Image (tube, coloured by chain):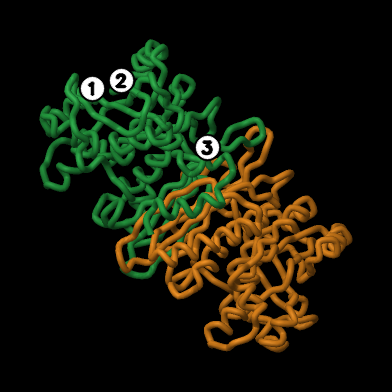
Chain colours: A orange, B green
């Protein structure tokens, strides 16, 4: 069964408004006079990470990808629960060290969880539940409106370029590999942007595929100018400036940047925030009436690539 | 690495009081003026369930075991997040049906989660996070005091007897098999008992091993009279009344009953509650000064069996 078929089956028991129709990055639940934001992501050996990946990086990424979902909802992380499949002692010890580093970097405490054993030779699976608190309205993916500008935080494609270098066995590109191995969820930016945006989500599967999801959820069209996609010096050095490099960046995924739509009159505040927190926030396109995703490069319309990002993971 | 070694490593990042030192059934977090109770349990194919088990029962059990942790903390369930490894379409469909039945039986909504794929031939792993709310003080495992009485809800050993019948291919014992396949977390009893008890936990790995854990957490000794362990008519019919049958019941596990310690003066209220909600609540032993678990059968002290329950799962 595919992911979307299974999610369709699950909708029957997800009628609570907190579930947001199982279409958002996280669940958002009013609890007393406070707002809880809850997300759970899993990673599987051989699918989301390789047995030979450094275990500390696997731990870091497991926590970071969940916190990125909280960031996209403007939430402050308050704790995590870990589901862990025990393995070889050295691996487990290095995983624990990596989780410790990441938890300390992001200021989050482990609150509980479960450890299990798996049959020998079986792919190990880890899950993490992140619990956050939102201070005000919590942006969804569905709030982009025709006339809004589309923005993205940081730079795009670094992680994908880092993975490409790793796979090719090419030394160098350290900052790119670091982006792949130790992504930094945009927690502060998410909390500061939440009151300014109409829609927000994180870029995990690829800028293009995730933009398409925002367009579908918002029942609007999105046009992206690939010439405006922010690329780092390191990315340009490794991958070049050709259109192919830009399309690679836009579909590579694992960016864990924030993608958001905001009314044009919010632009001065957004630009001011970028200066204040020292994180680039770049306008890369527009929300329009209609549906679907389209691309241009300056004035020139260009075709969507065959692959927009990761479809099922 | 063993579970307890890994948990010891995790304590370094679990200093938040909500984590309860990773020694309780669930995390308990003050959130505004409300109290959140959070738990996450995983199940693995070939370890916690078999590929040929009815998928609907696997789903039921995944939800029930987590809700049993909430029950043990006196919490009302408010939602769940599911981590699901996709498999064959018919299996997934039957799992979804089972989860729907259980969610409806326990009045809980699915709020979100994640679906992943696993490499072919790999054991599938599922995780569930249950979120609950507690109305007052939340009993821990550590609050049993010398002089308290030890109590257990319902009947013990039914599930273990059901599994034994299933494994032996013996037809019959339907109510026992039902207890194994579709356990009923004691949610109402847990909420009503919470203000009356000093310590409470659920019996998942076995009455004896779990009692030993309560004794260790409470820095006290526990003595259980195995003649007082409540057994069902169905259990007695299938397993007999010999001491071996009682010891089997006390170490079989999968009971999902409530084990609790309460001051003697609470006994009338506890007995009154049992009548009111129609669930047996049986006094089975005492909390004493000292440490460790001991057994008797009426006046006769008896040795602990070699196996007290499930050690690592």
Report the number of numbered marks.
3
Give the residue furthest to the front.
B290
Sequence-earlier tag: 3 or 1 = 3
Q: Are marks 2 and 1 in contact (CB under 8 Å)?
A: yes
Q: Which residue corresponds to mark 1?
A: B228
Residue B289: x and y in percent read 37, 25
Q: Is residue A230 visible?
A: yes
Q: Residues within 10 Å of mark 1 (few under 14, many from 20)?
A: some
Q: How crowded is mark 2: few (under 14 residues within 10 Å), some or many (20 or more)?
A: many
> Which is closer to the viewer, label 3 or label 2?
2
From the viewer's perspective, is residue A205 above or below residue B148? below
Residue A164: x and y in percent read 57, 83
Q: Distance of mark 2 from mark 1, alpha carbons? A: 7 Å
Residue found at x 38% / y 10%: B268
Q: Can residue B280 be seen in this view?
A: no
**Horizontal arrangement in the rendering, residue B262 relative to residue A107 (left or right):** left
Residue found at x 80% / y 81%: A299
Residue found at x 49% / y 31%: B75
> In the image, are marks 2 and 1 on the same chain?
yes
- Please, which chain is the residue tagged with disc 2 on? B
**Horizontal arrangement in the rendering, residue A295 relative to residue A61 (left or right):** right
Q: Distance of mark 3 from mark 2, alpha carbons? A: 27 Å
Residue A104: x and y in percent read 63, 56
Label 2: element kind: strand
- Please, which chain is the residue tagged with disc 1 on? B
From the viewer's perspective, is residue A25 above or below residue A306? above
Q: Which residue corresponds to mark 2?
A: B283
Label at residue B37 = 3
Sequence-earlier tag: 2 or 1 = 1
Q: Distance of mark 3 from mark 1, alpha carbons? A: 32 Å
């Amino acid at each position: 069964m595919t992911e979307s078929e299974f999610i369709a089956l699950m909708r029957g028991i997800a009628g609570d408004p907190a579930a947001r129709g199982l279409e958002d990055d996280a669940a958002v639940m009013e609890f007393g006079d406070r707002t809880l934001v809850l997300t759970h992501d899993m990673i599987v050996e051989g699918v989301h990470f390789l047995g030979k990946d450094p275990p500390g990086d696997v731990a870091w990424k497991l926590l970071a990808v969940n916190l990125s979902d909280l960031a996209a909802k403007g939430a402050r992380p308050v704790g995590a629960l870990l589901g862990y499949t025990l393995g070889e002692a050295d691996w487990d010890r290095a995983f624990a060290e990596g989780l410790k580093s990441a938890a300390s970097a992001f200021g989050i405490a482990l609150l509980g969880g479960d450890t299990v054993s798996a049959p020998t030779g079986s792919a190990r699976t880890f899950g993490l539940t992140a619990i956050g608190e939102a201070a005000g309205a919590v942006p969804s993916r569905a709030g982009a409106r025709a006339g809004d500008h589309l923005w993205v935080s940081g730079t795009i494609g670094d992680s994908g370029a880092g993975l490409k270098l790793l796979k090719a066995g090419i030394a160098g590109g350290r900052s790119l590999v670091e982006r792949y191995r130790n992504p930094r969820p945009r927690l502060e930016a998410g909390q500061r942007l939440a009151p300014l945006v109409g829609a927000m989500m994180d870029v995990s599967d690829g800028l293009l595929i995730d933009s398409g999801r925002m367009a579908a959820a918002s029942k609007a069209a999105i046009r992206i100018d690939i010439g405006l996609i922010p690329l780092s010096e390191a990315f340009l050095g490794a991958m070049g400036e050709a259109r192919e490099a830009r399309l690679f960046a836009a579909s590579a995924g694992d960016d864990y940047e924030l993608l958001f739509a905001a009314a044009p009159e919010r632009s001065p505040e957004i630009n001011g925030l970028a200066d204040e927190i020292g994180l680039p926030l770049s306008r890369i396109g527009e929300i329009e009436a209609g549906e679907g995703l389209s691309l241009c490069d300056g004035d020139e319309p260009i075709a969507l690539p065959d692959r927009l990002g990761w479809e099922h993971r």
